[in-house]
Image (cartoon, rainbow, N blue to C red):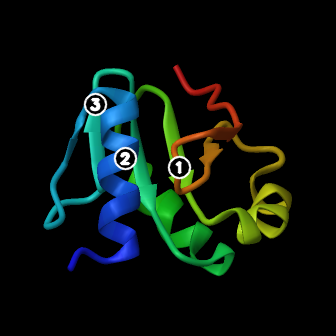
Amino acid sequence: MPSLHDRAAKLVAKKLHGTYIPTTSPDVKAKRGRAEVKSAANEVPKALRQLSGSSGPAFIVLPKSQHKQALRRLSRLKTGLMDYNGNIAKPSTRK
């Protein structure tokens, strides 16, 4: 049975028209952006490190219950925020 993390990553990969490879970081790589799936807002710094190093839109994927905390941490950053269904809560402004 796939974990919640795997299901979210596969759904986001489908929305971004990319691929999910569980053994690499970031979790989702696509032409339209990259995404790192996490389960808690306190993992945002780790996700930012995993998303650094390449150009293009980048998203952190968190459950909706964690969005309020995550939005505070991401307020002045160019990294976007998505929920586990692939809906964008904060768009990425990275080029």
Read off the residue under disc 1: 85
At x 81%, y 44%, the residue is 76
Secondary-structure class at tag 1: loop
Q: Is residue 53 visible?
A: no
At x 24%, y 74%, the residue is 2
Task: Work out whether mark 1 precedes mark 3 in sequence or the reverse, and give the earlier one.
Answer: 3
Q: Are marks 2 and 1 in contact (CB under 8 Å)?
A: yes
Secondary-structure class at tag 2: helix
At x 62%, y 66%, the residue is 63
Res. 11 mark: 2
- Spatial separation of the CA atoms under disc 2 and disc 1: 7 Å
Q: Are marks 3 and 2 in contact (CB under 8 Å)?
A: no
Front position among marks 1 and 3: 1
Task: Work out whether mark 3 precedes mark 2 in sequence or the reverse, and give the earlier one.
Answer: 2
Q: Is residue 30 visible?
A: yes
Read off the residue under disc 3: 30
Question: In the displayed structure, would residue 77 be above or below residue 45?
Answer: above
Of all residues shown, which one is farthest toward the front?
1
At x 40%, y 44%, the residue is 12
Front position among marks 3 and 2: 2
Circle 2 packing at 10 Å, graded few (<14), some (14-19), many (20+), is some
Under mark 3, the amino acid is: Ala
Under mark 2, the amino acid is: Leu
